[in-house]
Amino acid sequence: MFLRVEEVVHLADCTLRLKFSNGITKDVNLEPELFGEVFLPLRDPVRFRQVYVNPETNTIEWPNGADFAPEFLFEIGELVETADLPAELETV
């Protein structure tokens, strides 16, 4: 089974809450990963908040084409307990 990102919520600064296709939700701080030509512009908070899930690639993406592999995001993320989830991100 391929891992996919199903939902994304911007929490603060460079931190996102991601719901994965395996039912697990993780908080991911991407600040340490925002370097290089495509990622450096995302240090601008306005641009970073433009994140969305691309249904064709099944991962998060920004309008400038920057993206991260779901497996990488899952690996660096911190598990969120179900009790800490808002209703729209609760796992079944």
Image (cartoon, rainbow, N blue to C red):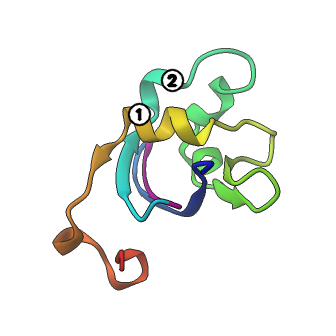
Q: Residue at x 57, y 54 (%)?
A: 49
Image coords of residue 15 (percent x, y): 40, 46
As displayed, is residue 67 above or below residue 62?
above
Classify the position of the C terminus by image quarter: bottom left
Relative to 5, say whether 30 is above or below: above
Indicate which disc residue 75 carries: 1
Q: Work out whether residue 39 or residue 21 is closer to the camera in this orientation and state it.
A: 21
Q: Secondary structure at mark 2?
A: helix
Left of 38 or right of it: where is 8?
Answer: left
Location of mark 2 (residue): 33
Say which element carries label 1: helix
**Residue at image point 74% right, 25% down:** 38
Residue at the (56%, 32%) spot, across then down: 43
Image coordinates for residue 70, horizontal then vertical, percent? 58, 42
Residue 62 - label: none
Q: Name the residue rendered at 46%, 59% in the picture.
A: 22
Count of numbered badges drawn on the protein: 2
Contact between marks 1 and 2 (CB within 8 A): the answer is: no
- Stretch of the chain drawn in magenta: 14-21
Is residue 55 rendered to the left or right of residue 50? Answer: right
Counting other residues with Cα less than 10 Å from the Cα at mark 2, is it few (<14), some (14-19), or many (20 or more)?
few
Q: Amino acid at mark 2?
A: Glu
Q: Is residue 70 magenta?
A: no
The residue nearer to you, when weighing 50 against 55, is: 55
Question: Quick check: 48 above or below 18?
Answer: above
Residue 40: image quadrant is top right
Q: Residue furthest bottom?
A: 87
Between residue 84 and residue 37, name the one nearer to us: 84
Q: Image height check: is 8 above or below 84?
A: above
Which amino acid lies under the numbered mark 1 shown in the image of this protein?
Glu
Magenta stretch: dominant secondary structure: strand
Mark-to-mark CA distance, 1 and 2: 13 Å
